[in-house]
Amino acid sequence: MADSNGNTSSSPYTRTIDLRTKTVREKRQKKAQERLTEASGKELDALDPDNLPDRVQQAMRATGWKDLMDVQKQAIPYVLAERDLIVQSRTGSGKTGAFLLPLFEVLDAQRSEPQALILTPTRELAKQIYEEFEQMKTATRETFDLEAVLVYGGVGYGPQIRAFKQGVQVIIGTPGRVLDHLNKKNLILDKLDVLILDEADEMLSMGFYPDMKEIKSFLPDDRISCLFSATVPPKVRALGNEFLRDPSFLSLSTGQVSVEEIEHRYYIVDKMDKDRALTRLIEWENPESAIVFCNTKREVEYLTNFLSNYGYHASDISGDLSQKDREKAMKQIRDGKLRFLVATDVAARGIDISELSHVFQYDAPDDPDWYIHRSGRTARAGRSGTAITLVAFDEEFKVKNVEKEYGVDFTEGELPDEDALGERVAARLATLLRERFEQKPRLVQERVSRFEPTVEALAESHPALLAMLVDEVYFSHLEAQREHSRFDEAEADTGTAPDGASAAKASDERQQKRNRTQGKKRNTKRGNTRGSGRGKGRSGRRKGNRGSRNKGRS
């Protein structure tokens, strides 16, 4: 509805997007970045190789590099100046060198104790960092005496403990195993000088926050802390506020905006395998909440049923849904009671949910304009977001049309294979189970130990039964995840985050409540069936049975 000047009136159900200019977006992006760049002290000038300390130069040459990459030139001065730092930089940009090289000026080989801790989300990344460090340290006789150790799960504790006792300067590992050693007093970090959080967004996505928070309690306050991340959404900012002191901020994501960024990705998939491709991406991305767009109402209905049967809490929004029901669905997803909305373009008009982290496009839109509207459902209110599109082999031209029309920078992704996906899910699951076990009273832990032989026997003889139980635990926590891991704007500003113990307890209470409710429904159903049979004779029983069969089909 327009006023006399032709302006559109504001409404809680509509949002006007100017698709003709980038001015408004650029101002919003600049303001968001300025909030992050409230650093202590002035910005530091980038360093060329010739201006580096001698040991850092030697370490660079040991890798065969003739020059520094941009992220290294800009980040190294802050570490050398002992300034805390948040760096946004893509994978493959040279960020590993950005935090390893200055360590050779900071570390003291004469001190046989941990001086640097580098936390990573995966063992593969830890190995890569370790290999680069081992190559760099060959630069001089002094740096050659520096020792590093890999610390991650899935391998024995013995070699890691022996390395601690022999004296190492650098710990490189995943949060779970590092925390295990700290709790068992195998590892002491009270003299730590440098903390590096690498791929921070990935660590949060994989559920490592409770472990990271507990690790922090073992560290001295007087330290240099650096956080590296491909994206800087509110939850990463909250992590930075919690672990770092007045951090400076560097954004090295060329052509992208640091905070209000939308990452645009597409995947080429077989039309007959789109539903399973979607679930694989959902498990990989682990979004807090998302809208899934389809081109037809029939696809919406099918996909909603498919996601629900797979185990996700999903609901559809159709064009004929009343406003009251639409608002109910909106409230559910804002409150964390609903994780996925499946909708058509028409049905999704007016939806404005700032917490949406992802938009999935199950069908590529025919009109480039609709892509802008769809992807604009994420990255609201200073947040970052991800827009993922599934396209058939003959539909890639639709993505190219959007690129040409609006200058959207797409990246073609490759579906994660089963091994990589399984490892990521296993890492999340291990964190969840360890957290739940450690929250149990000592007597309960003793009681649980009785079942260890049973579990070992099941793993040998009936792995499917054990997998079923593990799957139930995983999905019950996964669906409750959004409530106890959300970082709203207030939490991002204060650097606070939900407490892991209280979140897990709340999750258990919700699961118990659902079990009681389901039990009451089953008892009521049995009582009604018996009652209708006694009161109405054969006719009543036939009617009741027919209703049960119809319900089963639905």
Image: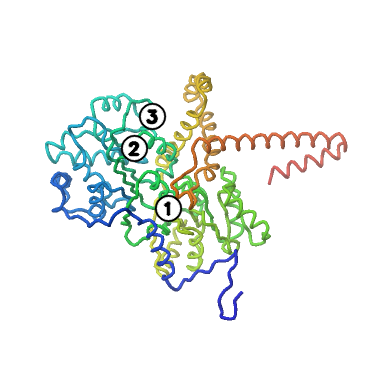
Separation of marks 2 and 3 at Cα, in angstroms: 15 Å
Residue 102 x/y as whole percent: 22, 45
Name the secondary structure under disc 1: loop
Are the residues flagged by discs 1 and 3 in contact, CB closer than 8 Å? no
Q: Is residue 165 left or right of residue 547?
A: left
> Mark 1 or mark 2: which is in front?
1
Q: Residue under label 2, please give it.
A: 123
Q: Is residue 36 left or right of residue 497?
A: left
Mark 1 is on which residue type? Pro
Residue 546 x/y as whole percent: 77, 42
Residue density around tag 2, few if under 14, some if 14–19, many if 20 or more, within 10 Å: some
Q: Residue under label 3, please give it.
A: 180
Q: In terms of sequence position, does the residue under pointer 2 or pointer 3 come before the other?
A: 2
Q: Residue furthest left?
A: 141
Q: In terms of sequence position, does the residue under pointer 1 or pointer 2 come before the other?
A: 2
Query: Measuring 37% from the left and 41% from the top, which residue is drawn there?
Result: 121
215, 231: nearer the viewer: 215
Mark 3 is on which residue type? Asp
Q: Residue under label 1, please give it.
A: 233
Name the mark on residue 216.
Answer: none
